[in-house]
Amino acid sequence: MPSQEQVNQFLNDLVATPPEALFLFLLGVVACGVALLALARRRIAHKTERKREREKFKTVCRLVETQRKEVNYLQTRLHSLESYVDRLNAHQQRVLDSATQRRQRVDEAIGIAGRCADDIELSSRAGISPSEAKLIASLYRGPASS
């Protein structure tokens, strides 16, 4: 801390300083203040811009994460649907095979209808139901055979 004598000496020197020098000194102080203010504003603007960019980046990251989850869900759903389509194709093939076998049994029943003694024999030999055997027999044996 300066002594009283040093403070007095400073004030005497200050009073003795020409006004032009004081004016230039104050002008320099004001210029430094303005420069510091401009730097502070520029720093605040830079911080604000960086904050805005971080917010945008976080928003993009959240969007990407949401889309990643949606893609994963859609992939899972696609695999599930592909599996379902495969099961449907297999079922369709079984139905077609069954229909082909069924048609073959009916064709065989029609072929042997005249050679079987009764509807039960026709049913057991051709692998068809008794009602189908009765119908085939009535259609292909004729009414006199029943």
Image: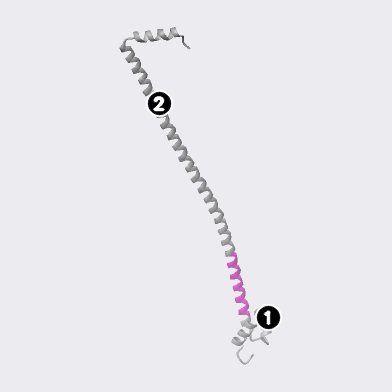
Number of residue marks: 2
Nearer to us in this view, 15 or 61: 15
Query: What residue would you read off at disc 1?
Result: 125
Magenta span has 103? yes
Query: What secondary structure is found at the residue carrying circle 1?
Result: helix
Rendering coords of residue 98 (x, y %): 61, 72
Q: Which residues are magenta?
A: 89-108
Magenta span has 29? no
Q: Residue at x 68, y 84 (%)?
A: 120
Nearer to us in this view, 127 or 76: 76
Query: What residue would you read off at disc 2?
Result: 39
Q: Residue at x 37, y 8 (%)?
A: 13
Rendering coords of residue 135 (x, y %): 61, 85
* Residue type for callout 2: Leu
Q: Quadrant of the C terminus?
A: bottom right
Give the vertical position of 7 relative to 69 (above or below).
above
Rendering coords of residue 74 (x, y %): 53, 54
Q: Residue at x 47, y 43 (%)?
A: 59
